[in-house]
Image (spheres, rainbow, N blue to C red):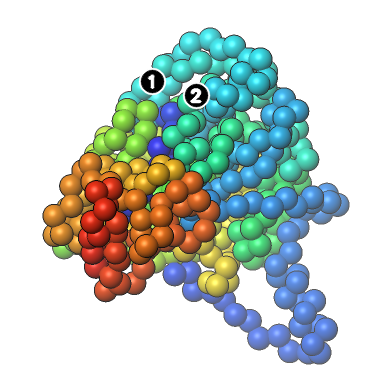
Amino acid sequence: MTVRVEAIGMSRRSLVSRMLAYGTGLVIGTPATARAALQAVRSWNFGETHLEWEPLEIGAGDTLLVLAQVGGLPVRAVLDSGSGASIMSTALAAKLGLSGERRTISGLSAKTQVLLARGVDVLLARETRRLPFAIIGDLSAVSAAFGRPIDILLGADVFTGNCIALDFGNRRLAVAKSGAFQAGPDWKAVPLERGAKQELFIRASVAGLAPVPLMLDLGSSAALMLSSTYTREQGLLKGKPVSTAAIGGVDGIKINDTFTVTRITIEGFGVADVPALGMRAWLSTSTVGNIGLPLIAQFDVVFDVTAGFVWFRRLDPRQRLPMLRDRSGLGSAPSSTGLTVVHVAAGSPAERGGWAAGDRIIAVNGHPVDADYTHGQLWRWRYGPAGTLVKLTMAAGNVRELRLADYY
């Protein structure tokens, strides 16, 4: 989960540490038979286990928000399988009366000092798990980005012992005991492995190449991250338009590359034209990249970390989470009063228009940027069709125009 920085690849991956060909079958028989057959295809086979589905929200188009309880208190949480441990806000820790012990943790490309709290009970979708510890951190930046408190990032530790079903088509999740899922012919079982730092990863093919280890990270708002070393060795940038993006993490804001990968294939399931980040500093020694929520949400997904598998099932294209592509080139940090530009992407409309870091936007097409910016549709302005003219009101009161375009 990273600090929210607006733009493609301006991922929120680790705040303290964003196609398929859909098979359509012809069902012959009565309407009732057809309906039963379609229901069977979309069923969730947990045997005798009764699933209690809970709603989930996709915040700002690329972040998985759920309701949970921590220590008996109701909280708003981000589900983040890419974080080895759960991270609670300092405010929540204070409410629970928790004090911490100091430790050092690793982010994507740096390390930082944190506090650990021991023995934390988390209730998610009616299943309770006691975490051996949770990290206490400042989540004010991500809370400000969403205009509402984010109390905790639920990491891979919450997945242990549980079977977590994510129905992206219907925006809901359920939790059962490990081993309860029985899959079916329309599901692909993919081995789920752990890296040297306990990061969860699978193996997938990038642009038709041999499968490589990629972290499976629900907390990443970038569809795909790849280490710059891997992209260079495999020639993935040759002949492609390449731009830049900023990513905020434990080590502050760093500049990385943005480009498009022609295809990602997971056990025969392919996803085309995937927006990607080339990470110039990649700490993991076990993986060469990271699959984030926008790519994961092209499928129905069931995690069973304890059993060592994750299952994927194709989604109707109309139900898939859009893999949003920025067409402005403005990397900005939102607040309740405006957007502050922190990076201007190379070769983008913003660079051609003379934008610079430090520029401050207070309204988009006449609509003020406030605490509700991420709640409605205003945040989508950067993802409009190429050629769209956007009018941006600056803090000084003048209005600047920016015409959206594909630039990577």
Q: Residues within 10 Å of mark 2 (few under 14, many from 20)?
A: many
Q: Position of residue 19 (x, y in %)?
A: 44, 69
Q: Residues within 10 Å of mark 1 (few under 14, many from 20)?
A: some
Q: Which amino acid does the dot numbered 2 rest on?
A: Gly
Q: Mark 2 highlights which residue?
A: 137
Q: Position of residue 39 (x, y in %)?
A: 75, 72
Residue 347 in the figure: left or right of residue 329:
left
> Which residue shows up at 67% across the image and 19% down it?
96
Question: 15 or 281: which is nearer to us?
Answer: 15
**Disc number for residue 79:** none
Chain-order first, disc 1 or disc 2: 1
Q: Mark 1 highlights which residue?
A: 112
Q: Position of residue 107 (x, y in %)?
A: 39, 29
Q: Is residue 374 visible?
A: yes
Marks 1 and 2, how far apart at CA = 11 Å
Residue 150 in the figure: left or right of residue 174:
left
Question: 221 or 265: which is nearer to us?
Answer: 221
Circles 1 and 2, Cβ within 8 Å, touching? The answer is: no
> Which residue shows up at 51% across the image and 43% down it?
147
Q: Element at badge 2?
A: strand
Task: Indicate the quadrant containing the C terminus: top left, top right, bottom left or bottom right.
Answer: bottom left
